[in-house]
Image (cartoon, grey):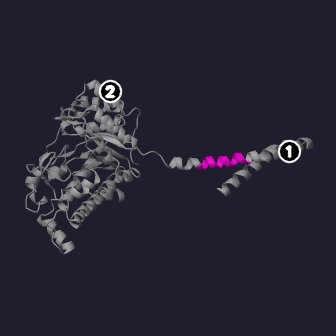
Amino acid sequence: MVSRFNRKSEQWRVWVVNASFKSMKSPFIVQNWRRLLKFLFPILILISFFTVLLVDSFTPAIAQIPRQEIRGVWMTTNDFDTLKNREKVQDAVSQLRRLNFNTIYPVVWNSGYVMYPSAIAQRAGIQPFVYKGSDGHDILADLINQGHRKGLLVIPWFEFGFMAPPTSELALNYPDWFTQKRDGSQTSISAAGEVMWLNPFHPKVQQFITNLVLETVTQYDTDGIQFDDHMSLPHEFGYDQYTVALYTKETKNPPPTNSQDAAWVKWRADKITAFMVQLNQAVKQRKPQAIFSVSPNYYDFAYKFHLQDWLSWIRQNIVDELIVQVYRPDLQSFVAKISRPEIQEAQQIIPTGIGIMTGLRNNPVPMQQIKSQVLAAQERGLGVTFFYYESLWNDALEPLNERQAGFATLFRSPALRAKIE
């Protein structure tokens, strides 16, 4: 600071003297000008000093650019009536843009099937069970095109992760790809019903998922890819023959009978983390600007019950944005979850948001609850993403106009997101 101050002072003095004496030839004028200069010099010194201070004060302000605010919505298979129709998609995208949303997360992996024409799935012997548009068009390509025209990011969502129904062709054709509980059973009950779990430690499973992800980000002009709470494994699983042998080889001991044994939990969580690191590297090699997005449950639940150590993922710099699912009707419980230190840590590094429930077909959510939760998130500098599109205003308690007017109050000004460069 001192050297910059002296340099500025010297520059001021030289400039003033040069500018003055070039035109001042009269001794009388020179004498009076010197008196004036003697009077002005301390003032000029002060001006230069405060100029340096101001310049220095601007520097951190430039560095502290606000992180991009996430204002998103998931589009699920329940939204297919909208997705299959080009005009409805156009209306949906236009409405979201008017209401100052900036991101759409459309499902592309659900129930063991992809939602687009996939050569990878066909080579795996999975019939091309694809949701096509009403005129036979590619619904994902259409949504991406229309979203980009309105300045919205479109990040396809691998909703089911390692999860698949027992009736899926994936489960029927590749039984050795799936893991099991200690008692030999292979299913659990989820929000999607009865499901089996692909073994996240099996090389063939890892390669299959990786191939599907790379196909999605390269076949389409996506802005990234998103994985949620199902890119994980319930703690009861991992007792299949392959995993038992791998654990025994690496630790010289069989897996503990207690599925929540700390070392057993950490070993499996670390294996999932290692796969996610490899998956991130594969995506970035194929499309460096792709946003690698994760949307897990809150950390304690995610790690202890689903072996999903997403905080480690963030610390290893493989996550470009985080959206923590906090589906709580009670505001006090909601606020407690979004105020946790791991969320505060994440938002210092990457765009961070909260997943908010806007309703289910058989369980609509009142607009007042949505407003209060969005406000709580915004007060903490967090973005939001809503689950899911149809429940924003079509499957709602309030009339359509009232519901949309409510959302119009949530985001009063645009917050367009820039792609990663």
Residue 222 visible in image: no
Q: Quadrant of residue 412?
A: top left
Magenta run includes residue 248 = no
Q: Is residue 297 left or right of residue 236?
A: right
Residue 90, can we see it? yes
Q: Residues within 10 Å of mark 1 (few under 14, many from 20)?
A: few
Which element is circle 2 on? Answer: helix
What amino acid is found at the position of numbered circle 2 in the picture?
A: Ala
Q: Position of residue 347 (x, y in %)?
A: 39, 50
Q: Which residues are magenta?
A: 45-56
Q: Position of residue 416 (x, y in %)?
A: 40, 38
Task: Tell me the amino acid under the disc marked 1.
Answer: Arg
Q: Residue at x 33, y 47 (%)?
A: 338
The residue pinned by badge 2 equals 405
Above or below, comparing residue 415 to residue 163 in the picture? above
Numbered label attached to residue 287: none
Q: Nearer the viewer, residue 284 or 97?
A: 97
Q: Earlier in the sequence, mark 2 or mark 1?
A: 1
The furthest residue to the bottom:
252
Q: Residue at x 35, y 30 (%)?
A: 408
Q: Is residue 201 left or right of residue 409?
A: left
Residue corresponding to mark 1: 35
Q: Residue lying at the far front in this picture: please name it.
A: 332
Q: Residue at x 16, y 68 (%)?
A: 256
Instruction: Return the residue nearer the eye: 40 or 299.
Output: 299
Q: How many marks?
A: 2
Q: Position of residue 286 (x, y in %)?
A: 32, 53
What element does badge 1 sit on? helix
Mark 2 surroundings: few (<14), some (14-19) or many (≥20) residues within 10 A: few
